[in-house]
Amino acid sequence: MTIDAHHHLWEYNDRDYVWMTGEMTALRRNFLVPELKRVMRESGVDGTVAVQARQMTEETEWLLDLAGRNAFIRGVVGWVPLADPDAGKYLERFSENPKLKAVRHVLHDEPDDSYMLRDDFNRGINLLRSFGLAYDILIFERHLPQTLTFVDRHPGQVFVVDHLAKPRIKARLLSPWRERMQELARRENVYCKVSGMATEADWKAWTTDDLRPYFDAVLAAFGPKRLMFGSDWPVLTLAGGYKTWMDTFRSFIAKLSADEQESMRRGAAIAAYQLGIDQGL
């Protein structure tokens, strides 16, 4: 089994997806379950984790409903207002659904680069463990110093870094991203998704060789037990097809042992998101 630990679904409208800038016009349409199932089938992917794309509880409800009607969606990373005084009530309501596995806030779009260090936000993060939920960290490379402080405030909390913390691949810059990721990886409660790499490179002209140094860096830092495959579909389509990215990922892990490949294809996602507890995996 291969699990895609990061994809999105949406029914597009021009009100809720303001993050789709002018260069992202190809994303301004519906991306729904039938199309996802087709690209998964073409690429040999068996299960997925659906991730929020809007900061709305209505989307969390919608994704959980889709997961309930489509068994291949093994889990949902939803959004709840963690900085709200009533964050616990939202978490209690949504966590009644066993498909809710984690929560995410779009930190890299906050005007305040230190938003993750706010007391009200951290009070919400403190609640996640009691509900058995992980937290997905969505940041740019520049947020890594604050992220180290943030993670250290919650030593028992499972964190998953999305998209390798968005290194500057297009500019071919490895430092200081590589060194900061090495430091972050010393926290054993932190996992990382091998996702979003092509869209941080030159969309039209990236090659596997452009991406490989960044993969090699996170493999050395986190090891295969804390790295997981993610497509970031349909955002991925800005820089290539689902199968192209799946083939690229497989080329990255081809020389690893069978157990190491298994961990990155499914084991790390199952461990971080507790996918096997209620689904017989």
Image: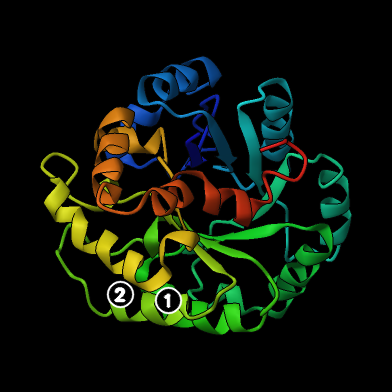
Q: Nearer the viewer, residue 140 or 47?
A: 47
Residue at mark 1:
144
Q: Amino acid at mark 2?
A: Trp
Is 249 on the left or on the right of 87, as rendered? left
Residue at mark 2:
177
Residue 69's place in the image compared with 130, above or below, is: above
Query: Residue at the spot x=50%, y=81% of the render?
Result: 148
Q: Residues within 10 Å of mark 2 (few under 14, many from 20)?
A: many
Dot 1 lies on which element? helix
Where is residue 259? Give x, y as percent: 44, 51
Is residue 229 in sight in this rendering? no
Where is residue 94? Give x, y as percent: 81, 45
Q: Earlier in the sequence, mark 2 or mark 1?
A: 1
Mark 2 near mark 1, Cβ–Cβ under 8 Å? yes
Where is residue 202? Give x, y as percent: 16, 48
Q: Amino acid at mark 1?
A: Leu
Is 98 on the left or on the right of 235, as rendered? right
Query: Residue at the spot x=84%, y=66% of the render?
Result: 85
- Residues at marks 2 and 1, CA–CA distance in whole angstroms: 8 Å
Is 226 on the left or on the right of 66, as rendered? left
Query: Residue at the spot x=28%, y=59% of the render?
Result: 215
Query: Residue at the spot x=69%, y=48% of the render?
Result: 101
Q: Residues within 10 Å of mark 1 (few under 14, many from 20)?
A: some
Where is residue 224? Give x, y as percent: 42, 60
Residue 69's place in the image compared with 90, above or below, is: above
Query: Which residue, as the protein is rendered here, is positioned at the far front?
Result: 258
Residue 144's place in the image compared with 258, above or below, is: below
Location of the C terminus by quadrant is: top right
Is residue 242 in sight in this rendering? yes
Question: How many marks overall?
Answer: 2
Dot 2 lies on which element? helix
Q: Quadrant of residue 127?
A: bottom right
